[in-house]
Structure formats: C-alpha cells, structure tokens
Amino acid sequence: MEIVLTINGQRIESNSDFIIVDKTKNFIKFVFNFSEEWDDFNITAQFRQGEHVCNVDLDENRCAILPEEISYGICHLVIYGTKDEIAGVTDEYEFRIEQCKFVFEDEADGENP
C-alpha cells in the first residue's frame, strides 16, 4: 500500500486520508514528493513513536517502508536531508496507526480464530 506525502519546503502534507493498521510487515510504503529545494539531497525519514526511533534512508525513488517496530498509536514523522554543507529538516507530521483486530494463534485463548 502506498501513502503519498508531499514535502513543500519544510512542511509535510497529505492530499488524502489514509488508514494504517499495525502488525503489517513490508506492506506500507511512504512515497515522498519533494519541492525542488530538496533536489540532490541525501534524505532520511525518521519515524518516532514513544521510545522507538527508526531512521530509514529513502531509496532511489524517494520511498521508505514503515518500520515494523512502529505499532498502533500515534506516530511522528520528520524528514532530514543533507547536501554538501547544507542540512534541511521538515516540521513534524503526525498520523495514527490503528490496532489490528485479527487474533493470531499465539494470542488466542486456546482457540483458533
């Protein structure tokens, strides 16, 4: 699933509503569209939730997979980039991850779902 976010200067924006449910693995891909001042920057997305801080370097398509350490609750995203002697950072973008309602066998009380 792709979630498209736009970085305009130092602001992160979403053009649509999205829902993320926890317990996914390698399923949620953030696709970032940057304004021109970010051209040629080496960019890292930082996902922060409570004590968990996960830095993910964007791939050649300027995408990042949501780290599996991030679970349900509120998550904060910040973009940081460097180019030569220049460093840029965005404001914080907050989004919610819903709790998975699927009951896995190892979580069931003696019954299979």
Image: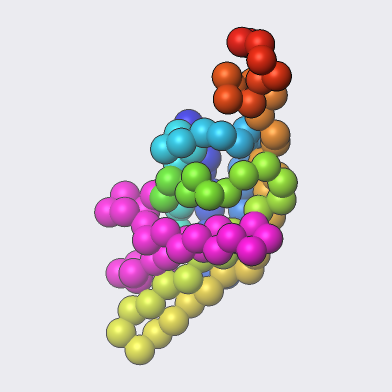
In percent of the image, x 39 and y 49: which residue is there?
63
Quadrant the C terminus occupies: top right
Q: Judge from the rendering whether residue 93 lies leftward or rightward of residue 39; answer left or right.
A: right
Q: Where is residue 13 in the image (x, y as percent from the top left)?
A: 62, 53
In percent of the image, x 57 and y 69: which residue is there?
90
Q: Nearer the viewer, residue 14 or 18?
A: 18
Q: Position of residue 9 (x, y in %)?
A: 54, 68
Q: Nearer the viewer, residue 9 or 19?
A: 19
Q: In which quarter of the image is residue 27?
A: top left
In percent of the image, x 66 and y 20: which residue is there?
108
Q: Position of residue 94 (x, y in %)?
A: 69, 55
Q: Nearer the viewer, residue 59 or 13?
A: 59
In percent of the image, x 55 and y 63: which residue is there?
53
Residue 52 among those drawn in magenta: yes
Which residue is most to the left? 60
Q: Judge from the rendering whether residue 101 lies leftward or rightward of residue 64; answer left or right.
A: right
Which residue is most to the bottom? 85
Give the colouring mode of the picture.
rainbow
From the viewer's perspective, is residue 106 above or below residue 113? Answer: below
Residue 10 among those drawn in magenta: no
Count of numbered circles on the image: 0
Using the rendered image of the protein, determine whether residue 76 is visible from the camera's viewpoint.
Answer: no
Q: Give the range drawn in magenta.
A: 38-63
Using the rendered image of the protein, determine whether residue 68 is visible from the camera's viewpoint.
Answer: yes
From the viewer's perspective, is residue 8 above or below residue 63? Answer: below
Q: In which quarter of the image is residue 81?
A: bottom left
Q: Position of residue 55 (x, y in %)?
A: 46, 63
Which residue is most to the top? 112
